[in-house]
Amino acid sequence: MTQPIRYELLRRDEHSLARRGRLTTPHGVIETPVFMPVGTQATVKTMAPWELAEVGAGIILSNTYHLHLRPGEELVRKAGGLHGFMHWDGAVLTDSGGFQVFSLADLRKITDDGVTFRSHLDGSLHSFTPESVMEIENALGADIIMAFDECPPYPATREYVETSLRRTLDWAARCKAAHRRPDEQGLFGIVQGGEHIDLRKESAQRLVELDFPGYAIGGLSVGEPKPLMYEILSATTPWLPADKPRYLMGVGSPDDLFEGVERGVDMFDCVLPTRIARNGTVLTSEGKRVMKNARYGDDFLPLDPNCQCKVCQTFSRAYIRHLLKADEVLGIRLTTYHNVYFMLDLMKQIRQSLDEGRFLLYKQEFYARYGYNETNAGEEV
Amino acid sequence: MTQPIRYELLRRDEHSLARRGRLTTPHGVIETPVFMPVGTQATVKTMAPWELAEVGAGIILSNTYHLHLRPGEELVRKAGGLHGFMHWDGAVLTDSGGFQVFSLADLRKITDDGVTFRSHLDGSLHSFTPESVMEIENALGADIIMAFDECPPYPATREYVETSLRRTLDWAARCKAAHRRPDEQGLFGIVQGGEHIDLRKESAQRLVELDFPGYAIGGLSVGEPKPLMYEILSATTPWLPADKPRYLMGVGSPDDLFEGVERGVDMFDCVLPTRIARNGTVLTSEGKRVMKNARYGDDFLPLDPNCQCKVCQTFSRAYIRHLLKADEVLGIRLTTYHNVYFMLDLMKQIRQSLDEGRFLLYKQEFYARYGYNETNAGEEV
C-alpha cells in the first residue's frame, strides 16, 4: 500500500517543541506549520478557488456534516470529489462531522454504535457510525480524512470523558477497518481525553498503536481557559510520533498559532478569520480593526499598511467601510480575502522564523506589535 | 473649452437606424453600442473592479441619489472621485438621482425649484435642485453626468407630462449653467415627454438647442407596454443629432438591446443582469435558467455551454446550484459575473454584426436560439 500522506521533519526548534516540516499529499506539497482556511460547504465563504491560490492556501478544510446534508456526498462523488466539485486543485481535509453532531445537543442520541441526529436544516433523521462516516468521507474524496470521534463538552465529569474516550478509541479502530481508499486518502486519528492529562496520554498511545499517517488533537478550544488548553497541548504532543503530522483541530487565532507551534503542532484550522471578516473585523499587524467604526469613515490608508495582499494594495479603509455599511457583498469579500491572506502570511513568517532559528524572538516581536499583553489579548487597536 | 466626451459615427446600418460608433471619454475609448453595468453604491454588486475589466466593461453607471446619502459626495471627492474611491480605471456615468427621487412617491415634494425628499435610509430631509445635483455630480467626478430631470410616472395625464417636461427643460438649462467641470465631465440632457410623440419631439429639439455632448432618452421602461416603448423610441431618435451619442436610460433585457440598437440607441444600462443573478437566474444563449431548480441538481454542464466566461469555463450548474441553495456568497458572485459577461458579450456580437452589415440577421438568429416569440419573451428554457 502506498501511503498518500507523508510527513518529513525538516528542522526542530532549539528552544521549544516547534517543528518545520513538509507534508506531501496527492494534491501538492505543503510546508508546515500550516493554517487551513475553512470551506464548510465546499466553498471558503465569499472566496473563489483562484483567490485561495492567490493568497497562498495549499490545503483547505471542508465539513462532512454539512456536505452530507447538502448537497449529499453522492453528488460530490459524481463531480469528481470535492476537488472536482469546487474546482480546487490544492489539498483538502474533511473533518468527521463528530464535532458538529455532538454540538447539536438535544437533537442527537449517542450509543456505542454511533450517533442518531436531526438535521439542523429540515429536522430529518440521520445516523453517523464510524462505518457510515468513512463511506461519506471516501465519497467526498479529500486528501486527509478524519476518524469519527466524540468531542466531549467542557466542562464534563471525568467519568463522562473516560466513557467517551473508550468509545472514540473503539471508533478509531472501526474507521481504520472501514476506510476503503487508503491508497488515496490519509486517515488521521483524533486524540481526545478532555482536560485530563493521563487520558490524553492514553488516547495518544492507543491511537499510535493503531498507526495512522497523522494525528489530530481534538476537544480543545471548546470553552476551557486558554492556559489550560496550552497545558494540555504541552502534555499531549510529546506522546505523538515525531515522523507524523499533528493537527490541532478548530484552533487558530493569531496567538493560538504561535502557542500551538511552540508546543509542536503542525496543522491548524479555524473559522475565525473568515467569520470575523463577515462582521467587518480585520486582522492586522497592529491588532484587530472593527471596520464599521466611524473613525475609518475618511481614512484612506489600507486595512493594514504592512500587508502585501491585493486588497491592501488597492482599496482604502474608507471605501471598505462604505461597502460594509451599505451591506455590499464586495465589502465582506475584501475583508475575508485580507484576513485569510493575513493568517497564511503569518504562518509563512512563522515558518521563516523557524528556518532561521528565531521563532521565539519572532513571537515576541509579533505580540508586541499586535498588542498582546495580559489585559489585551489582541483586541481592537 | 475641450469637450471631454466625443462621439464618432463609424457606420450606419443599411436596414435600420442602428449605428456603430466610438465614444472617447477621459477614461478610455468605448465602442458603441455599449451596455453599462450598474454599480449603484460605487460597486457593481458582488464584483471587484478587476472582474469588471475581465468581463470587458468599459463604462459603468453609478447612482447619485444613493451616493449622496451614503457615503456622501464629499468623501468620494476626497478619494479622487468615483474612479479613485472604487479603484476603477474605466469610464463612469452618474445618473442625476431624478429617477430615484421621483420613485419615492409619498416621501417627496416637487416644485419648480427642485425636489424635497426624505432618505429611504433614515428619513432625513434632503433637497435636490439642478444646481445641487450638479455640485454632487461634479464631486463624484464621473466622465458622463446626467442633467437633473423629472421622470413622470406611467400612466400620467398629458397635462402632467407637459408641466413636468417644461420643468425638465428649464432644469436642463440650469444644469448646464451650474456645471463647474465641463472640461472634465460631459453633461447629457435627458429627453422626456412620456408616451406623447409630439412632446418627445419638442423635448429633443429644445435640448439640442442647448447643445449637449450627448442625449439620453428617459421615462421609458417605467411600466408601459414594450411595443409602446419601441414606438416612442422610433419617433424620438430621429430628432437627435447624428454626431452625438444617444443613451436609453435603465433599459436592457437582451431583447431590449436589439430593439434599442435597431432604433438608433448607442448606450444602455440596466440592473436586470445583476439583479436576477442574485435571485439565481442566469442569462444564456438558450434563454434564462432559474438555477435553483431541482433539474440542475446533478447537471454538470456549465451555465451556458456556448459561453467563454471564466465561470462557464470552470464550474458546473450542480456546484452553482449547491452554492445558491446553501446561501453561499460565491453562488451570486458566479451568476453575476456570468450575467454581466453575457450582456457585454452580446453587445460585442451586436457590434460585430453591425461591422459586417448583418445586424438584423443576427437579431433573428439570436431570438430563435434564445426562444423569443409572441408567447415567450425570453422566459425560462
Image (tube, coloured by chain):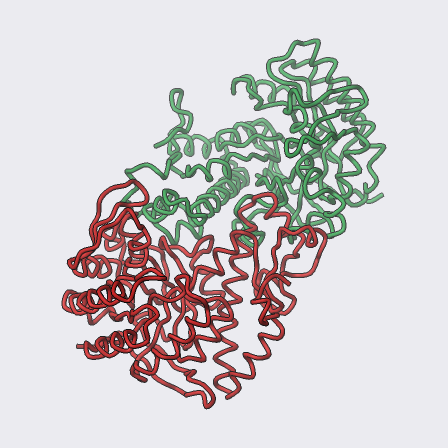
Chain colours: A red, B green
Q: Is residue A332 left or right of residue A75?
A: right
Q: Is residue A180 visible?
A: no
* Left or right placement of residue A348 versus residue A208 in this view: right
Vertical arrangement, residue B145 with respect to residue B206, above or below: below
Q: Nearer the viewer, residue A103 or B269?
A: A103
Residue B220 in the image: x percent, y percent? 60, 23
Frontmost residue, B206 versus A123: A123
For image coordinates 76% across by 29% down, the residue present is B127
User: Image height check: is A359 above or below B380?
Assistant: below
Q: Nearer the viewer, residue B44 or B142?
A: B44
Could you tell me which residue is drawn at 39 percent across and 62 percent down?
A222
**Residue A62, relative to residue B291: is it above or below?**
below
The spot of residue B138 in percent (x, y) is 78, 41
Q: Position of residue A285 (x, y in %)?
A: 60, 69
Rendered image quadrant of residue B94 = top right
Q: Is residue A22 above or below residue A96?
A: below
Considering the image in quadrants, where does the N terminus of chain A appear?
A: bottom left
Q: Is residue B116 left or right of residue A355?
A: right
Determine if residue A240 is in view: yes
Task: Specify the quadrant of the image occupied by residue A161.
Answer: bottom left
How many numbered markers are drawn? 0
Quadrant containing the C terminus of chain A in the rendered view: bottom right
Q: In the image, B352: left or right of B331?
A: right
The quarter of the picture where residue B125 lies is: top right
Task: Point out residue B187 in the picture as x, y percentages from the top left corner.
Answer: 75, 36
Q: Nearer the viewer, residue B116 or B331?
A: B116
Looking at this view, name the residue that lies furthest to the bottom.
A14
